[in-house]
Amino acid sequence: MMNALELREKGYQILVNHLGQSDAIRFLQQMGWGQGDYTQERREVLGSVTREEFLEELRKVRNIESV
């Protein structure tokens, strides 16, 4: 079973894959998501993620060798 963060990430990725990034964002905005304190949410989600960890995850998502 996925934790809440994993579920959110997978759901967002599915939206992006099917709608494209811009339309996925528009959809989430229409659903009332994106309201609130972005800075606090970002700190909660990213925590102490290093630049290297972020880039490694980006590589996995994009299936690329290097960024």
Image (cartoon, rainbow, N blue to C red):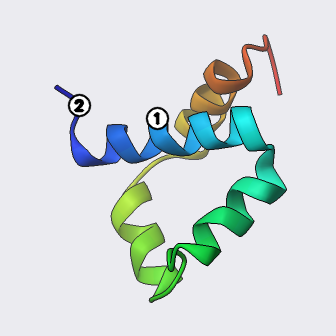
Q: Determine whether the residue tagged by mark 2 lies in a helix, strand or loop.
A: loop
**Which corner quadrant holds the N terminus?**
top left
- Residue 10: x %, y % from top left: 46, 35
Using the image as rendered, state which of residue 66 and residue 24 is in the foreground: 24
Q: Residue furthest left?
A: 1
Residue at 51% of width from left, 81% of height from top? 38
Residue 59 placement (x, y as % from top left): 69, 23
Find disc 2 in the rendering and name its residue: 2
Q: Where is residue 40 in the image (x, y as percent from the top left)?
A: 40, 81
* Front one among 61 and 46: 61
Which residue carries the number 1 mark? 10
47 to 37, vertically: above or below:
above
Q: How far apart are marks 2 and 1 (CA)?
A: 9 Å
Amino acid type, residue under disc 2 in the picture? Met
In the displayed structure image, the side of residue 66 where residue 63 appears, left or right: left
In this rendering, the answer to whether 52 lies above or below 28 is above
**Is 60 positioned to the left or the right of 39 in the image?**
right
